[in-house]
Image (cartoon, coloured by chain):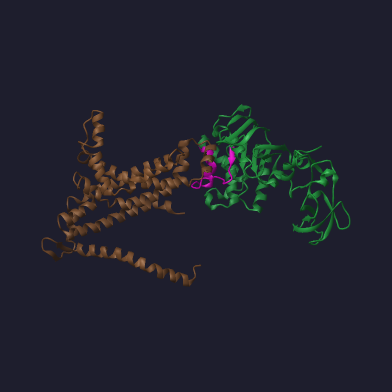
Chain colours: A green, B brown
Amino acid sequence: MGHIKLDQVSKTFGSVEVIPPLDLTIEDGEFTVFVGPSGCGKSTLLRLIAGLEDITSGHIEIDGADATLVPPAKRGLAMVFQSYALYPHMTVRKNIAFPMKMAGVPKAEQEKRITAAALALNLTDYLDRRPGQLSGGQRQRVAIGRAIVREPSAFLFDEPLSNLDAALRVGMRMEISELHKKLATTMVYVTHDQVEAMTMADKIVVLQAGVIEQVGSPLELYRAPRNKFVAGFIGSPKMNLIEGAEAAKHGAETIGIRPEHIEVSTTEGTWQGTIGVAEHLGSDTFLHVHGIEGCDPMTVRVNGELSLKHRERVYLTPNLTHLHRFGADGLRLE
Amino acid sequence: MATQHSRSAARFMMAPAVVLLLGWMLVPLTMTLYFSFKKYLPLRGGDLGWVGFDNYVRFVTSSAFWPSVMTTLIIVGGVLLITVVFGVLLAILLNQPMWGQGIVRILVIAPFFVMPTVSALVWKNMFMDPNYGLLAYLWEFFGAQPVEWLSQASLTSIIMIVSWQWLPFATLILLTAIQSLDSEQLEAAEMDSAPAFKRFIYIVLPHLSRAVTVVILIQTIFLLSIFAEIFVTTGGAFGTRTLTYLIFQRVLESQNVGLGSAGGVYAIILANIVAIFLMRIVGKNLDA
């Protein structure tokens, strides 16, 4: 089980409303990612679900029972913190055993679960070390191990990968995704990194200033962003948003075209510009093209092997089937 | 930056301080050792020559010696126990967000700024006096016979006074230690279904162990040599004569410098025994 329902949940700190009333349903077994820029209230929302913060109004339902006033320990949720929050004076084994010890799980059962978790997370050789002797990725796994052994109805992750280096982050991303497939437990994951959101999520919740901008699967958000904010936030590099005369031609206030949906030619095309900075990733090259009205610079993705020079004149042609149109209120026009 | 040149420059510049400290330590130590082997009675003939280990034998066979060692250890142990236990509790209390936090913290630290002599006098005359003391009024208010603190419960009284002085120190150090505890650890423990008391036992207390060690070590150094509190209140009577006080009596009241110096050497040995035990018990907390 692990069905979480938020009903008109809001949170104010003093006189500041961090989260205006919002509704959200997280289905059993789903991998839900809260994503948004810093300070958008996504961590607060997670802490409200965990019970570490009291909600100002509304109700939280977990597995059909009202959990609004239930203390965090009784909600049956496990949380992985950004700082990992491992207990520094305990060995890895004791860290992982701690929640079971508190819950009064018999010793033999504790041993069994620790062994299983250590095996699943590649921690068997480190069980007698202290957190201070582990690397960042290992600490991360211990924190996850401590969550797993509780056999919670849902896992809550609060930006768990933000303290890891880039290579490790990609690896841990995969490990967490695999863990989700294996356990099939509900996971709620907070991140500011839209790549993490796109790669891991079954369902993405895009937040801005405490307001849910859009909820949907990664590809839904990619194909049909509900407004300009989601359009700009989801996808890497960012969607090009063009305003003015060019947008008016398509009957919209703003039009959006992703860098991967633009054809580049040196001879002919819809728009004309000059190449500024080119970011070479090897497989792809991102060109920043200047001189296009309504959008300066425009980012374009081209094949990495294509050789174009700085200040060279190019012509760009958008693929009109992937054109997004937004009205004056920022909402998507169908 | 630690080049050969900067290292030797650093040594050169540290030299005056090191030499001064070394002199400060060596001169009194040598003089104590020197006098401890002499019969030296300033008002009864002065320097009366070498006597070998006579002073040492006399000091240790005196009926006052072992009781004074016990008294010293009881006072040190009692004060350590009170200050550490209440220090931890006060630190937790002061760490809670409350109105007027800054002022309350300054008030809590205030006793540490009072000179030992003054605080002992204040306690003796304003609190513990059996006729006019506040405690006497309190006892009478409840219809009880006022306690003559300094004669009936002399050791307890001294421990109370010294604890009152040292509690702020313990509280201050433990408070800063508590403030450095990562709040996510407490939240994680809360999620791990540890109730408040268990969070204290398993998370807060281990986190404080290093600070507690520092408090114990530093306080022990100072508590082994408390003097003013005893001098001002009981004058060493009623079983409050510590080793320090015994030495004082031998040198100044009996005017026997040689005997007192021998006592001083015993005091050094006692301090070192206590230090070794402490380092064995709590010193490992300072590693890592």
Q: Is residue B211 above or below residue A111?
A: below
Is residue B150 shown left or right of residue A244?
Answer: left
**Would you say residue B16 sits in the magenta stretch?**
no
For the C terminus of chain A, give its image quadrant: top right
Q: Is residue B17 above or below residue A119?
A: below
Identity of the residue furthest to the top in this view? A65
The answer to whether residue B72 shows anywhere in this view is no
For the N terminus of chain A, give its image quadrant: top right
Residue B274 appears at what percent x and percent y? 31, 52
Q: Nearer the viewer, residue B227 or A122?
A: B227
Q: Quadrant of residue A11?
A: top right
Residue A195 appears at what percent x and percent y? 70, 47
Q: In which quarter of the image is residue B100?
A: top left
Residue B150 appears at what percent x and percent y? 21, 41
Count of marks, rendered view: 0
Identity of the residue furthest to the right in this view? A268
**Would you say residue A86 sits in the magenta stretch?**
yes
Query: Which stretch is magenta?
Result: A78-101
Identity of the residue furthest to the front in this view? A245
